[in-house]
């Protein structure tokens, strides 16, 4: 009985081993089938990609084959978007159109600074501000209105200068008659002449002396632009404050008269500015003050 039970146990173990070997063989064969199927799919996909690339190569819109361009002209003929090309000798020293747009946008960003410093804007805005302070109306007219008035008056005063710049520099440059550097020099001449006429000679002499540059006191061509611009700014500030003081004088007289009357009446607790402001506005309106201020301010540039 013991021998039979041992044989039975051995047969069961053999069966288990056979079953395990069969399972290993089945799994191995399944892996081989999956690998073969995957390799076949990958091969088909690769062939499809190659076919698509061949079709794309056949349908390319390039004018020339890649790598065949030898000169700048060949590169320009290629269908390349947003190209930026610098030309020197071959382009007669001219700038590419994209670079011109970049320089134009840069000039537009700097334009507000040039408008404030190199034109009549500074003098006009300061004088209008002094007028409002003399009237003691606090914020009437508001700052936005004063700036708008100053801008339009600046356009009116600078119109002849801008017209000369356009006709003598911009139009010939667009027509290709002059180069970029020559156009800049021609455009600077009217602006320099305007600033030189409005600048006091003492201010120019001071800055010329600080720069160690000889000057006869009259010739405009001897004054560098780097000296003319700060001289013009200082001169404009001085002129604007002189005009503002002249506007202040009649209103100061009104304040003094009102203060004297109040003190003689014993009303010292009442602020004189509260009583004088209506008289200032009345005097300004009856004398047509805005017309006098603006007309004389514009005439100061001629």
Image (cartoon, rainbow, N blue to C red):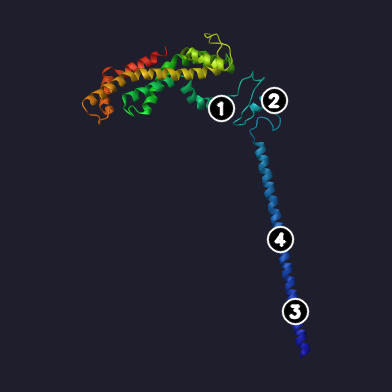
Is the C-beta separation of discs 4 and 3 under 8 Å?
A: no
- The residue tagged 1 is 102
Q: Earlier in the sequence, mark 3 or mark 2?
A: 3
Q: Quadrant of residue 180?
A: top right
Is label 2 in contact with label 4 (beta carbons under 8 Å)?
Answer: no
Measured in 3D between alpha carbons, the distance from the residue under mark 3 to the one under mark 2, in whole angstroms, is: 84 Å
The earlier-in-sequence mark between 3 and 1 is: 3
Residue located at (71% from left, 54% from top): 39
Question: Where is the C terminus found, in terms of image quarters?
Answer: top left
Badge 2 or badge 4: first in the primary sequence: 4
Q: Specify whether 68 is left or right of 135.
A: right
**Alpha carbons under labels 2 and 4: distance apart:** 57 Å
Which circle marks residue 33 in the picture? Answer: 4
Q: Judge depth for marks 4 and 3 and give the one in front.
A: 3
Distance Cα–Cα, label 4 vs label 3: 31 Å
Of tags 3 and 1, the one toward the viewer is 1
Upstream in the sequence, badge 4 or badge 3?
Answer: 3
Image quarter for residue 70?
top right
Rendered image quadrant of residue 244: top left
Q: Nearer the viewer, mark 1 or mark 4?
A: 1
In percent of width and height, residue 40 lies at 70, 54
Q: What residue would you read off at disc 3?
A: 13
Q: Return the residue at label 2.
A: 71
- The answer to whether one can see residue 174 in this image is no
Foreground tag (1 vs 2):
1
Of residue 230 and residue 202, the one placed in the foreground of this image is 202
* Residue neighbourhood size for the residue with mark 1, other residues' Cα within 10 Å, grouped as few (<14), some (14–19), many (≥20): few
Task: Check disc 3 and report its element: helix, strand or loop.
Answer: helix
């Amino acid at each position: 009985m013991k021998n039979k039970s041992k044989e039975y146990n051995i047969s069961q173990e053999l069966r288990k081993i056979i079953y395990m070997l069969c399972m290993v063989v089945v799994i191995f064969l399944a892996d081989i089938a999956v690998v073969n199927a995957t390799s076949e799919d990958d091969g088909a996909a690769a062939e499809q990609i190659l076919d698509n690339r061949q079709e794309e190569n056949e349908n390319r819109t390039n004018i020339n084959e890649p790598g065949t361009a030898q000169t700048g002209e060949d590169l320009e003929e290629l269908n390349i978007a947003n190209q930026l090309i610098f030309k020197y000798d071959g382009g007669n020293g001219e700038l590419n159109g994209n670079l011109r747009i970049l320089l134009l946008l840069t000039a537009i960003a700097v334009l507000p600074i040039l408008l404030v410093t190199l034109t009549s804007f500074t003098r006009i805005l300061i004088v209008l501000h002094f007028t409002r302070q003399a009237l003691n109306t606090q914020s009437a007219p508001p700052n936005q209105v004063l700036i708008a008035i100053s801008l339009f008056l600046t356009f009116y005063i600078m119109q002849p200068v801008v017209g000369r710049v356009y006709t003598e520099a911009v139009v010939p440059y667009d027509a290709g008659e002059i180069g970029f550097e020559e156009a800049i020099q021609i455009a600077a001449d009217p602006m320099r002449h305007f600033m030189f006429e409005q600048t006091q000679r003492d201010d120019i002499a001071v800055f010329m002396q600080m720069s160690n540059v000889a000057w006869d006191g009259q010739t405009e061509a001897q004054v560098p632009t780097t000296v003319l611009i700060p001289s013009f700014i200082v001169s404009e500030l001085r002129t604007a404050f002189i005009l503002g003081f002249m506007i202040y004088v009649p209103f100061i007289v009104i304040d003094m008269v009102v203060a004297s009357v109040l003190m003689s009446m014993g009303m010292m607790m009442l602020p004189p500015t509260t009583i004088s402001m209506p008289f200032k506005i009345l005097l300004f309106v009856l004398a047509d003050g805005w017309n006098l201020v603006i007309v004389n301010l514009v005439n100061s540039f001629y």
